[in-house]
Structure formats: C-alpha cells, structure tokens
Image (tube, helix red, strand yellow):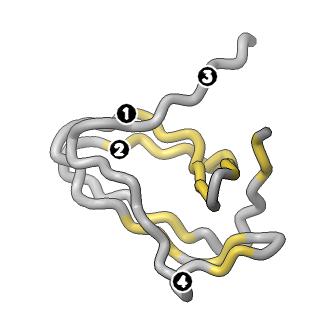
C-alpha cells in the first residue's frame, strides 16, 4: 500500500478550530473536545487530526475514521489522544 499525503479538508462549512487556553491542555497527551461547524456539503472520510502548536505540527490517526456527510457535525473527544511530532 502506498502512503498518501494528508490533505486538509476545505469547503462545505469546514474551518479550522482554534483552541483557547484552558480548553485543551497540551502535555504528553491532549485532553479536551473539539467540535466543528455543521457540514454544508459532504466532507468525505476524515482519517487524521492535525494540531499546530506555534510552528510545530502534530498529528494522530482517528480510529475509527469518520465519514462526514452534509448536515453532520464532527465532534472529537481528544482525551488522551497521543499526538506525534512532524519535522
């Protein structure tokens, strides 16, 4: 199987979510919840979550991955999701 390059979602009501200090605690693991706005179109399959902290990018696979269709709301419980650092 060939690895593919992750692509950020776009359109259909998707927008990056900003973490406000205190909402999410960044330590060795991430704790907190993230809710995205209503999908106004199909987003397709969401396999990973990515987080920018300053100029560092961290990512983690979603298990199970999510298929987001029009009128869905993506909610993620990040409790103890281990993020890996990307150079």
Q: Earlier in the sequence, mark 4 or mark 1?
A: 4
Please give the label number shown on residue 5.
Answer: 3
Q: Nearer the viewer, mark 1 or mark 3?
A: 3
* Residue on which the image places disc 4: 21
Left or right: 18 in relation to 55:
left
How far apart are labels 2 and 4 at the CA level? 28 Å
Q: Earlier in the sequence, mark 2 or mark 3?
A: 3
Q: Earlier in the sequence, mark 4 or mark 3?
A: 3
Residue found at x 59% / y 43%: 48
Q: Nearer the viewer, residue 18 or 55?
A: 55
Q: Nearer the viewer, residue 85 or 35?
A: 85
* Residue on which the image places disc 2: 68
Q: Residues within 10 Å of mark 1 (few under 14, many from 20)?
A: few
Residue found at x 35% / y 44%: 68
How far apart are labels 2 and 1 at the CA level? 5 Å
Contact check, label 2 and label 4, Cβ < 8 Å: no
How far apart are labels 4 and 3 at the CA level? 30 Å
Q: Residues within 10 Å of mark 4 (few under 14, many from 20)?
A: few
Q: Nearer the viewer, residue 6 or 87?
A: 87
The vertical placement of 4 against 47, above or below, is above
Q: In the rendering, at what x and y percent does residue 11 appear?
A: 24, 37
Q: Earlier in the sequence, mark 2 or mark 4?
A: 4
The vertical placement of 44 against 48, above or below, is above
Q: Residues within 10 Å of mark 3 (few under 14, many from 20)?
A: few
Question: What residue occupies the far top of the structure in this picture?
Answer: 2
| Secondary structure of residue under mark 3 | loop
The vertical placement of 45 against 23, above or below, is above
The vertical placement of 7 against 17, above or below, is above
| Secondary structure of residue under mark 4 | loop
Contact check, label 2 and label 1, Cβ < 8 Å: yes
């Amino acid at each position: 199987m060939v690895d593919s390059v992750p692509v950020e979602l776009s359109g259909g009501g998707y927008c990056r979510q900003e973490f406000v200090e205190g909402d999410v605690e960044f330590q060795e693991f991430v704790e907190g919840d993230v809710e995205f706005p209503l999908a106004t179109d199909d987003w397709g399959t969401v396999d990973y979550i990515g987080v920018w902290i300053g100029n560092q990018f961290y990512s983690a696979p979603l298990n199970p991955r999510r298929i987001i269709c029009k009128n869905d709301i993506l909610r993620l419980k990040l409790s103890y999701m281990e993020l890996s650092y990307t150079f």
